[in-house]
Amino acid sequence: MELFIDTANIEEIKEANSLGIISGVTTNPSLCQKEGRDFKASIKEICGIVSGPVSAEAVSMKCDEIVKEAEVLAKIAPNVVVKIPIFEDGLAATSKLAKKGIKVNMTLIFSTNQAILAAKAGAAFVSPFVGRLDDIGQDGVDLVADIVSIYKDYGINTKVISASIRNPMHVTASARVGADIATVPFNVLKAMVKHPLTDIGIEKFLSDWQVLQTVTSKN
Ligand code: E4P
C-alpha cells in the first residue's frame, strides 16, 4: 500500500517527503482554506516537492465548468490529479476528462455503488472516506474492503485511496483489506512512527553504549 499525505501544509509535506515514505499528496478545499494561501500557487509548490500524484479539487458544479476548471488545474504540473466529488455532473465531467487523458480522483465516496460509477466514468482514483463513515456508526474500512474486492473481481484498474484517516489503526486496517493507497494526515504519520518500546530501547542502547565508551577508554 502506498502512503500519500493528506494536507496542504508545505512544511508538513516537506518533512514527510524527506522521510522517503510518501508517494503523493491529497488536498481539499478545507485543507487549503486552513493554509490561507493562493490555491494554484500552493498546488504548484507542492508539485515541485513531490513527484507523485497531487490531488487538487475542482469546485464547479456544472459539467462544462468542471471540465474547464480541471483543464486549468491539470496545466499547473504534470502530476496534478483533479479531485471531483461524486454527483451527476461530476461523473459526466470525469468521463470527458478521462477521454482527454486528465486523471481524476473521485472523492466523497460513501458507497460501493458510487465507487462502481466512478470507475465506469474512468476515474483513475476513488476516495472512500473512512473516518466520516465511522463518525456516523458505519464501518469505513468495510467500505474500502468491499470496493477493493469488487474492483478485483472485475479487473477494474481504478486505484482505491483510503481517505479521511483519523488514526494509525485506520492505516493498518486499510492495508489489511488491500487499499492501493492510504492518504494520511501529518499527525497520524507521526504517530505511526512511534512506539514506547522503541523509545525505551533507543534510550537503553545509548546508555549502554556510553558505559562501553567509559570502560574501553580506561583500557
Ligand atoms: C481525502 O482526500 C480528504 O482530503 C480527506 O481525507 C478528508 O478527511 P476528513 O474527513 O478528516 O476531513
Image (cartoon, rainbow, N blue to C red):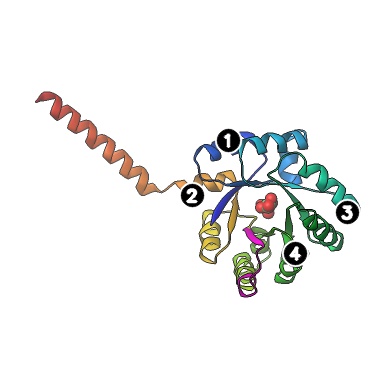
Q: Kindly identify the amino acid type of the residue bearing the numbered disc 1.
A: Lys
**In the picture shown, does residue 191 fall above or below 43?**
below
Find the distance from the CA under tag 4 to the CA under tag 2.
31 Å
Which circle, 2 or 1, is nearer the viewer?
Answer: 1
Total number of numbered labels? Answer: 4
Residue placed under numbered mark 3 in the picture: 61
Q: Quadrant of residue 114?
A: bottom right
Residue 100 in picture, x, y percent from top left: 80, 53
Residue placed farthest to the top in the image? 218
Which circle, 3 or 4, is nearer the viewer?
Answer: 4
Find the distance from the CA under tag 1 to the CA under tag 4.
31 Å
Residue 59 at least partly seen:
yes
**In the picture shown, does residue 126 fall above or below 6?**
below
Residue placed under numbered mark 2 in the picture: 192
Residue placed under numbered mark 4 in the picture: 118
Taking 207 as reference, is 45 left or right?
right
- Within 8 Å of ligand 1, the CB of disc 1? no
Asked if the residues shown at circle 4 and circle 2 are in contact, with their CB atoms under 8 angstroms apart, the answer is: no
Residue placed under numbered mark 1 in the picture: 14
Asked if the residues shown at circle 3 and circle 2 are in contact, with their CB atoms under 8 angstroms apart, the answer is: no
Residue at 62% x, 75% y: name it. Answer: 153
Residue at 53% x, 57% y: name it. Answer: 1
Q: Local crowd at mark 4 within 10 Å, few (<14), some, or many (≥20)?
A: many
Q: Kindly identify the amino acid type of the residue bearing the numbered disc 4.
A: Ala
Where are the magenta residues, as a range? 151-161
Q: Quadrant of residue 108?
A: bottom right
